Image (spheres, helix red, strand yellow):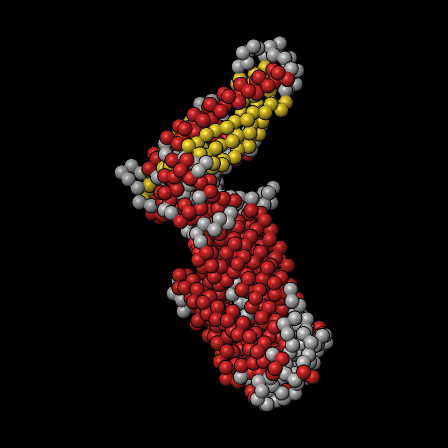
Amino acid sequence: MGPRCLRRGRARLVVALVVVLAAAVLGGCWDARDLEDRAIVVGVGLDRARGGGIEVSLEVTIPDGTTTRPGISGNQLGQRGAGAGGTKVVLTGTGATVHEALAAMRDGTRFDLFLGHVRIVLIGEELARQGVLQHLEMLVQNPEIRRLIPMAVVRGRARDYLMMTVAQDNTAALYLSQMLDDLIRTGRAPNVDLSRFLTDVSEPGVDPVVSILGRGPGTEAGVQWVGLGVFRDDRLRAVVRPPQAWYLMWAMGSPRRTTLFVPVREPVSGGVILDIFHVDSRLTVQGPPDGRQAVVRLLIEGRVAEHRAGGIDLTKTATMRRIQDQTQRDLQGRVQRLVDQVRRQGADPFGIGRALRTVEPRLWREPPGVTRAAAQRCQARVEVVVRLRRTGLTIR
Amino acid sequence: MSSSQAVTVRGALTVIVNVMIGIGILTLPREVAAQSGPDSVVATLLGAVPVAVVLAALSGVAPWIHRRRLEHGLETLVGRWPARALLLAYFLYFGTLAAVIARGFAEVVNANVLRNTPVEAIMMPMLFAAVYLVHHRTVTMMRAIELTFPVLLVTLVVLALATMGRANLVYVRPQWALGLEPLIRGAAASLFAYAGYGTYLFLLPELEDRPRCHMPWLVAGLVGLIYSMVVFSAVGTFGVVEVQRITWPTIELVKVTQIPGRVFERLESAFLAVWVTAVFTTVGPALFVAAKALQGVLGLQEHRILAPMFLPLLYVVALLPTNFAAVTQLLAVLGWISLGLEVLVPLLLWAIAGWKNRPSRRPAAARPAAGPGGTGPAPALGGAMTGSGRPGAGGTGAAGAAPIPAPAEPGTPGAGAGG
């Protein structure tokens, strides 16, 4: 055996050793945790704790957990979801902050709480009225939590909503997130996630608006969208119910498409129902510096969805124009009243302050309160233009 | 040197782009927004202007360095000891930069993904990989970086485009609201994020050809465009105030981004994978520059042996900052140093080259035409001559010791094209 063969043999030995060592060292983690040992949090509920502080509720799914490893609910803060097949549990913890509450929950569970799959954040109405910025900021400081998670305020306590059972799906969080997603996709609710909420709270010149969920007898899961919560900074100030909630969304420029039915009584013929399928909203600030006026312009396009048979003749352009004009007057009054009502609460979900800063850049250098005060001094005027585009399948 | 072994101009510029896109991109929106508010995008673009000027200046210096040992080229311009001092400063600066970037990378990964993994364990593979890269020839490093470049570029552009849909124009519409000074401060903050372009000086000796006039502007423009798109998306999405609260706005931006059709629900995994490459292509070249600079200081033939020797030093330097705040502070200090070493020094070298090249100092017969760099004529080089006016100064007479063959007359049309 020559020296060359020896060298080659040694090289092969070294390579083999490296491969074996790499396989031994890199093959797995010493602190690996099986999926079965992870408690996957799908919903987070935030409520005001009795006696102060915050109560955090987590809706948790435990893959194969409660069936093969019974006893999770025996020594837990939470309760097993009824009819959920034993794989869902709602944990509850209280503390001065979100992290303290989470830490309390972690102390009471033998599973690793994983927040990377949270689908919805629910906030109890009482806590929302008290202020939520601090709690949400703490929540997003957890790297597992994504700012894209949708949020909603609930009538009552968030924990009760996470505890509810849903016929088709055993996690309330998933059901509620799908429900909100559908509302957003069809233009019936604004797209508000943690990111949008925190941005609107932090930016001077605009206030957030959040969907409100409440109990709804006769609905699939006993829950329904009951309107919009208007915030001033991070505190809930008012709840606007439909149809005013839709007008608020129009004025905010949120939806581009909506399936809103507006009943219009045509004096001659009884009535028509319009299907609003497109709303374009523009906010401009006009006038001299000492007399600024915020103008909300709405271009509303709709179609006649329903009318009494033999009542009106939609082949006549004069009839169409009359319906259009009447709807325009009617809607302008309604939206104006809504805008005034919301502004009386001191809230600015329309972003008048933000628009004001584009025409008065000096406001960027001023404290946030100056922008709010300047926005409140502005008069807000609503201009509505209605266009009837289609007449439907029956014309007389 | 055959052309396949040479560092191409395109390759060198690719290296520069890759060096600039590192960990700075993660914090850039926060830092610029804190200074310039709604004018952040303009400030970011403004920050790219000095980079272009510096790269153009270095292209102007190229005739003095091209196809020569860097230390010899610098000696012809500034003299022996100032050249050594400069190289030592570059060594310290780029060595520290490589270590701190590796540490910053480890901190980001630790905070966002591998929360229970020690920072040392995250940092070491990056340092090992960088050392391995620098242990090869310059052209090998260039090719490795060229390979990763399209992935990085496409990912960043797709990310920037995908996130623009959420952006609210009100937050990023330039309004000159805060005045000129904040705008300049924002541009300076963004200039720090571009740091690393000084690498170009160390690639010049081995360039296959001299760069064209528009190349520096193209490089600075490309990075400026990518950075400004990221700043636009981040500030537009989170708003001027909220973006200042987020430690790494770009990562948060990726987290709130969804590709239409729900192809990728969690884009951050893909982004972080690509970003690891971006950091690697920053740490590697920075280490390369440190090795090259030390090679020049010590008068060694090769830089490759120096890279493994750096490792313990890099490890210690990287672990000196006690936490991420200290890392950020150190990066800010390095940013200020970069103004000196990466902006002022190249401009100074350019000025000296211009001064030495002025018509009154050269005989008319020896006056060559301007080269493709368009930055003026080049000094007469060759053999033992130096441009310093001191024959034999700086040991440049040891032309045989230099691995790079003596060039043809730089500055003349087509000079150096074939080596």
Q: Which residue appears at 64% of the width and 64% of the height? A: B214
Q: Is residue A317 visible?
A: yes
Residue B287: x %, y % from top left:
53, 72
Identified at 28% across, 40% down, the residue is A52
Residue at position x 31%, y 44% from top?
A95
Up the image or down, A373 lies above or below A260; here it is below
Q: Position of residue B12 (x, y in %)?
A: 63, 68
Q: Position of residue B312 (x, y in %)?
A: 47, 74
Looking at the picture, does residue A253 appear above or below residue B121?
above
Q: In the visual, does A5 lie left or right of A47?
A: right
Q: Which residue is rendered at x = 51% and y = 78% of the image?
A: B87
Please say if A388 is above or below B180: above
Quadrant (top left/top right/bottom left/bottom right) for the C terminus of chain A: top right
Residue A87 visible, this orientation: no
Residue sitting nearer the eye, B347 or B189: B347
Quadrant position of residue A93:
top left
**Residue B414 quadrant:** bottom right
